Amino acid sequence: MPKQPDASAAPEASAQVTAAEISRLAGVTRATVSNWRRRHADFPTPAGGTDSSPLYDLGEVRGWLTGRGHGEKIPPLEELRTLLRLSAHAREAAVRLLPFVLAERRRPDLFNAADALPDSDVAARAQALVRELPAPPEAHFDDVTYTAPDAPLLRAILHCIDAGQTQGAVDVLAERELGDETTGGTYTTPGPVAELMARLLAAGSPSRYPARVFDPACGSGALLVAAARQGARHLYGQDFVPVQARRTLIHLGIEAPDSSADIRAEDSLRADAFANLTADGVVCNPPYGDRDWGHDELAYDPRWAYGVPPRGDSELAWVQHVLAHVTPGGFAVVLLTPATASRSLSRRIRAELIRTGALRAVISLPAGVAPPLHIGLHVWVLQRPELAAPEHHSVLCVDGAALAGGDGKTTARLARTGASGGAPGRDGAAAAAWDALSEGVLRYWTSYVTDPAAFEDVPGQARAVPVVDLLDDLVDVTPARNIRTAAVAAAPLAVAEQAAQLRRELAQAADGLAAEARAEEWPASGAEARQWRTATLADLTRGGALTLHRAGPPSSKERDTPPPAEFANRPVLGGRDVVAGQRATADPQTPVPHATVIVAEGDVLLAEIRSAHGTTARVADEQDSGAVIGRGVRLIRPDPKRLDAWFLAGFLTAEDNLNSASVGTSSVQIDPSRLRIPLLPLEEQRRYGEAFRHLYGLRQAARQVTELAALLPKTLAEGLTSGTLVPPGSGDGEGVAPARPSL
């Protein structure tokens, strides 16, 4: 155990805090702290730091806040994190304090008055409580010692527990020891992903859930907790980092107190603490890309039943380690990088896993649902072969991205929530996407494992891939490569009718575009270009000729409340809609701004962000009326007696005008107040406005032709390659014999 701080030593100097930490202590903004420094002569003077970043004595700050009646309003988890940062013994204290979280949760009656107890009494009671914990000898809880300097941290832990943030306290304590755990290729497993993996293990053993479950890279214990919730009673885990092993033990004590747990802190591959264990099921999220996993010293290890893993493929070392620790016929579920499915240096091991029937399913997840967020991980379902087991003739491949909907916005929301370890997409549309993914994966796996021969492929989502198709030169088991995206048995007549309809629409749109282009001649203004006086939109706003509107972000009080009734349940028109020439989004999951305005016919809609397509403005029509404006769009409401709307929209998007009103570098935005408009009589404005309306129609017609011109060749090509269409000149397609291949 680490050396304990000496309670009899001289007291440490008070810790120092920054202005930002003072603001968190008092529950105010940084600006408020700056005002206190200027306005109050008795505000503590800096005790260190620099002129630009001063540090203040924590004791003096607390005394000043108490004297002013501000008190401390720091959230419990932030209080614990701050105290750990300020403690001289924070690193070793965090490890020692972890068992106290579990002890206090089991016996909460002992510390109801902890804030009023002397520090020495708090430490003594905490120590006695921890040593009463029923834990395996490896936990070393009987060696834990607390002294008076630990009392503030112990009280902070109690505040977290009282606030219902017990697991959060465990995570904060572990942070001090772990630092950046991703540097070694080790990542946490988000709760929903852990739940999906635990349920896959259940589907593989439908009669009863595996009683003994093992995780050889247990980390924070998320996978073992998920297995315990499904019915596992005896949990085994190992992790290279000691604080992670203790963290798992505490996590299981909190979430699965009725299960037995045996957690060891050693290198699973080099020093297997469970060499004689064959569990009923295994779940694992191993480290990725680890080249120092013990390749040389483990070259002749008996676990490598499917081939010696290359130095650069530690993932397949973990796969074989997992299979060595599951009973014959038992299942293992492992989270792996997509490179494991296709890496050329390991194709022989993959081939052996397929030949023996050890690899049963590969499921791809969308990028963002689990770290590392920039790639879409794979879930491998493995089964240790039995001597008398029937031969497996296929491997199930499932494309999770297709099950989740596959659109960029939903995947982005899955990424945002998955990164924090929360339930991916608990915000409406993304919630439905995650539920569809997990339920679809479980449905396909359950159907397949029950009767592989009877499994019916689902184009674009799931396929039982024959072993003979996988055992080629690549042995690539990536789901996207092996799942057919289009139904083979598509109706040829339906495809031909769709192609004919697209041809008719393209021809009609092209004729309309040509007619628009030939409509009228556009005469020259004379020998020289016209000149006119101009005014900015800011000038016109001050003169009452128009008003400018935008959607504002919700205040801190509004974030958790619905928008005002006048805006609720209305479609939202954003900047992207204006640029794309689309209508307002009627998706009920699209958030409605609290501070916005309702669109009326005749309003000018201006996109704020300049893109490769420029910045677009258009005049709202009857179909736009009733929507509300969202992010990225400005609404300009002209006085129809003084300004023509289409005249305004046309001159707003002139290239020189936009250049003079653009601000920013990487993301170029438009400052509408700087845009300039010619000062012309209303009748002349209307003539220009009619011309700009015509040009907008021309752009829309060109956009439609472009879209159809891309869609028609794609449809025809897919028809030819799928066998549902034949080339022109082949008759009506009926009775056409397949061509004999030439040699």
Image: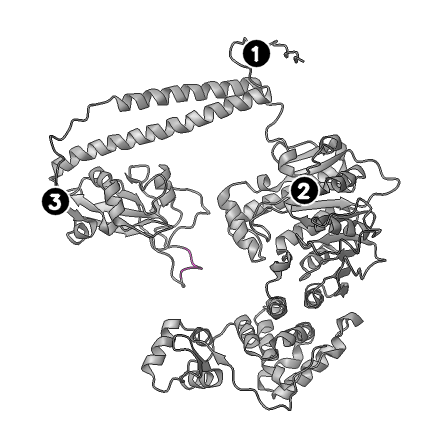
Q: Which mark is residue 533?
A: 3
Kindly give the residue lying farthest to the front in the view shown.
296
Q: Nearer the viewer, residue 219 or 632?
A: 219
Name which residue type carries label 3: Arg
The quarter in which the C terminus is drawn is: top right
Q: Residue at x 27, y 51 (%)?
A: 671
Label 3, secondary structure: give it: loop
Calculate the distance from the C-alpha at mark 1 to the C-alpha at mark 2: 43 Å
Residue 322 appears in the picture as rendered: yes
Calculate the distance from the C-alpha at mark 2 to the C-alpha at mark 3: 67 Å
- Name the residue tied to disc 1: 733
Name which residue type carries label 1: Gly
Label 1, secondary structure: give it: loop
Q: Quadrant of residue 446?
A: top right
Q: Residue at x 40, y 63 (%)?
A: 557
- Name the residue tied to disc 2: 343
Vertical side of 141 occupied by 499: above or below: above
**Eye-nearest disc, 1 or 3:** 3
Q: State which region is magenta.
A: 558-562
